[in-house]
Image (spheres, helix red, strand yellow):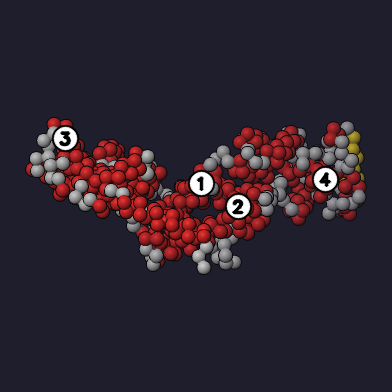
Amino acid sequence: MVSLWQLSVLLFIFVLVVQAEELTASEWLKRANAALTSYDYAGALEAFDQAIGLDPNSYLTYFRRATAQQALGRTSAAIQDLMTTVERNPHFGKAYLQQARIELKEGDFSLALETLNRMSSNGAKSLQKDGKQAEELLEEVKRAQAFEKKLGQIGSKHADDCITLADKLLQLAPNSVFARKQHAECALVLGQLQSAVTDWTRLSKMAPSPDLQLRLSLLSYYILGTRGSQVQDAGLAHLKACLHEDPENKLCIRAHKQLRKIDKALQKARGFSDNSKWTAVVSALKGAKVGGPTIYDEIQQVILDAVSSGILPKTIKNPADQSELLHEIETLYCRAYVEQEMINKAMPWCDKLGAVDPRNEHVLVAKGEEQMNQGNYEEAVRLFSQASEVSQSSGQKIRSRLAKAQKLLKQSKSKDYYKVLGVSRDADQRTIKKAYRQLAREHHPDKGGDQEKMAQINEAFGVLGNTELRERYDQGDDPNDPSGGQEASYDDFFAHAGHPFAQFFQQAHFQQGGGAHEFHFSF
């Protein structure tokens, strides 16, 4: 049973239909013109359709509908309406002029000339204003033809002249496919990748093709896009456009699957980084298969394959070196390893990143730690100071590293125990003991060695051979510095027979006085 509400709705629809049928062509035309004035081009087009349906011989209605068609980007439909206009009225000059302007903008210069010739032969230049506009338009078409011819002759051999000519041609014919292609090619020769991408993006709307969508996807996601940017998001959008045009395209299907896989791993790594889970960051970037290619390797291979297949032109100079995505992954690795104090693993990544971003805070921190390990404290202080200046996320940690470097610099100017034993700061206990043993034999006073040198060696080993004292020393606190407030020194270590030659030195007689050491060894 039909309800009262349903009956009301049906009645309302019926009234609308009846009203629509009762509107005249003139009334529809008024609605269409009002919609045009308010930039409602879709509404205008619908109203023009209704008007033409009621009065198919009105040439002005076709002419006005062409305006709506053009505003909606329906160039072919607009030209068809203009041609219908002059069929209805061959003397209507404005239709010829409008058609020729469209053909000029599209780069169809021969067609534009034909349209202007038809205007002349049909006597449509009778109005003085139309005749003057036709002459001006004819000059523009001829200039565009001359630019096109010259542009084709010089090609990309003279890239600067090519860009200048292409710009002039595009001012007259912004939708010229030839001019866009030449402009992009010459921009690449000059290293202007972003300019070329702008041209290709326009081309993808004017003359869409799977190869062009693939190229734009690769450049947007893998090369130019940064995290969270519209450019990187466009990488996926271009692939969707490719699949919309050709759902069975194998290259686009494969590229879409690969991009989604890489993006999923990258999103994980970014999330772990945001939450300071540095071990997980490295794990997320390892790739799906154990021992297989990492995410970084996969991206490099994608770029290599694109160049070898021609999807990316060979005129793009070092695309992998320009990849913002690879630089982001280098940053993730560099920081993850630095935060874990794994400087040796961090350096290859930090060096890659430093080649393009030498002022990156994580690069500066890694280099500072590397200099610390090598005992170059002044350089470490300089690097940590720079890192502190540019830091946006790790200010307190960097200041702690800087304070430590400053302590060690001050310490190194008085005593450098690592230098005395000839070992690196990251040497293990076995290496330290081996170095001590060798130096003790070389500088034994009973073997003609220097007592003062032997005292320095003993002092150095007394600190570095003890885990607790070494840790204090590494933090810039010398256990043998009276001003340091230490509670234990290397003498305590020796007294407790804590070094590998305790039995050996128990046979020796030590006398200390005035800061000097006197040794008598028996073997």
The kind of secondary structure element at disc 3 is helix
- Cα–Cα span, label 1 and label 2: 14 Å
Residue tagged by mark 3? 130
Q: Secondary structure at mark 4?
A: helix
Q: Is residue 440 visible?
A: no
Pointer 4 residue? 469
Q: CA distance from mark 2 to mark 3?
A: 63 Å
Element assignment for label 1: loop
Q: Amino acid at mark 3?
A: Asp
Which one is in front in this view, the residue at disc 2 or the one at disc 3? Answer: 3
Residues at circles 1 and 4 in contact by the CB criterion of under 8 Å: no
Q: Which amino acid type corresponds to the residue marked 2 in the rendered image?
A: Arg
Query: What is the CA distance from the residue labelled 1 to the residue labelled 3?
Result: 48 Å
The amino acid pointed to by label 1 is: Ser
Q: Earlier in the sequence, mark 4 or mark 2?
A: 2
Residue located beneath label 2 in the image: 270
Alpha-carbon span between mark 1 and mark 4: 51 Å
**Residue drawn 70% across the image and 47% down it:** 424
